[in-house]
């Protein structure tokens, strides 16, 4: 069931989104060769605590999971697509890596979700293009997210752009509603026909999150029970914003 947010709740989400964006910008600026995934996690927890907020992912147990997620951040490196655990099997980033930092933030009881992929040092041209094109796919999806349209309009904008450039789109990984919970209806696929799916209604809050790969679409789940990787080992990028549907252009809460 899709839950429409009230005007006063959207104001809280705007406050939380601004805090969220500041934390992600700070973490993005920290990314360089030699930094560890643990250091990014520690800084995120410090900033969340300073703001009086909560990490929405920390101790969250999604449906079907065998244990709660043990971190405030998801940090996914190279062929890891999403849900990498930064404080288990801690990794030190090296020149040429790409890393996705994904944060869920609970502010006054309401949740925003956003992610960014960053090149570590001197990443290659293909990897830099992958990141830039994933961000462009996100922008195209957001542009179609207007009241009166359909979820499929977002999906088509993302998928047609990505496929035209030869990228893979990971199976089964998609955007979603957000606000009262980390994952709400509707499901927002990264590929599909325009004019299909749930109708977009003002007051809906959704996380749009294209994930693209340099290879195929198949994914595998790591032994940690959370980290999804590309089956063929190709590298992946992920970009995400939480938005509010309006009658016209959407409001990007986490910009």
Image (cartoon, rainbow, N blue to C red):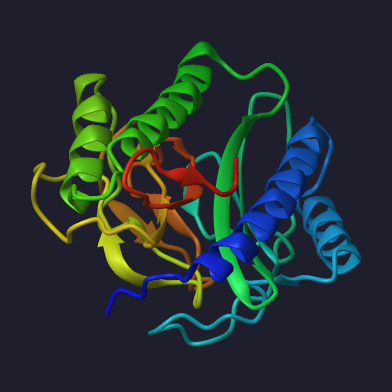
15, above or below 251, in the image: below
| Relative depth, front residue between 27 and 205 | 205
- Residue 6: give x, y in percent of width and height: 47, 71
- Residue 137: give x, y in percent of width and height: 36, 31
Which quadrant of the figure has residue 16?
bottom right
Does any portion of residue 67 appear in the rendered image? Answer: yes
Q: Quadrant location of the C terminus?
A: top right
140, above or below 175, in the image: above
Q: Residue at x 13, y 58 (%)?
A: 197
- Residue 141: give x, y in percent of width and height: 32, 37
Q: Tell me if 235 is positioned left or right of 76 in this view.
A: left
Q: Residue at x 74, y 39 (%)?
A: 25
Q: Residue at x 37, y 52 (%)?
A: 245
195, above or below 165, in the image: below
Exactly how many numbered labels are in the figure?
A: 0
Q: Quadrant location of the N terminus?
A: bottom left
Which quadrant of the figure has residue 4?
bottom left
| Relative depth, front residue between 195 and 129 | 195
| Relative depth, front residue between 97 and 174 | 174
- Residue 132: give x, y in percent of width and height: 48, 22
Q: Residue at x 17, y 61 (%)?
A: 198
Which quadrant of the figure has residue 28?
top right
Q: Tell me if 46 is positioned left or right of 164 in this view.
A: right
Does any portion of residue 240 appear in the rendered image? Answer: no
Q: Tell me if 1 is positioned left or right of 153 in this view.
A: right
| Relative depth, front residue between 140 and 123 | 140
């Amino acid at each position: 069931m899709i839950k429409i947010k009230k005007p006063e709740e959207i104001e809280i989400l705007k406050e939380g989104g601004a805090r969220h964006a500041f934390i992600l910008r700070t973490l993005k600026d920290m990314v360089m060769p030699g930094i560890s995934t643990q250091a990014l996690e520690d800084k995120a927890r410090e900033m969340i605590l300073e703001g009086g907020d909560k990490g929405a992912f920390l101790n969250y147990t999604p449906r079907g999971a065998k244990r709660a997620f043990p971190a405030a951040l998801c940090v996914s490196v190279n062929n890891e697509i999403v849900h990498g655990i930064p404080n288990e099997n801690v990794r030190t980033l090296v020149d040429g890596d790409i890393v996705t930092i994904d944060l869920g933030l609970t502010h006054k009881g309401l949740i925003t979700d956003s992610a960014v992929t960053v090149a570590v040092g001197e990443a290659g041209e293909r990897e830099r293009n992958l990141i830039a094109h994933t961000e462009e796919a996100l922008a195209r999806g957001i542009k179609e997210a207007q009241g009166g349209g359909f979820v499929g309009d977002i999906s088509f904008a993302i998928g047609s752009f990505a496929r035209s450039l030869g990228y893979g789109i990971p199976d089964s990984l998609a955007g979603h509603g957000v606000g009262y919970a980390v994952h709400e209806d509707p499901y927002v696929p990264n590929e599909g026909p325009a004019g299909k799916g749930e109708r977009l209604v003002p007051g809906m809050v959704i996380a749009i999150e294209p994930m693209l790969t340099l290879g195929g679409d198949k994914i595998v789940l790591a032994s940690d029970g959370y980290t999804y990787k590309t089956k063929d080992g190709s590298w992946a990028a992920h970009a995400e914003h939480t938005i509010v549907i309006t009658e016209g252009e959407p409001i990007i809460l986490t910009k």
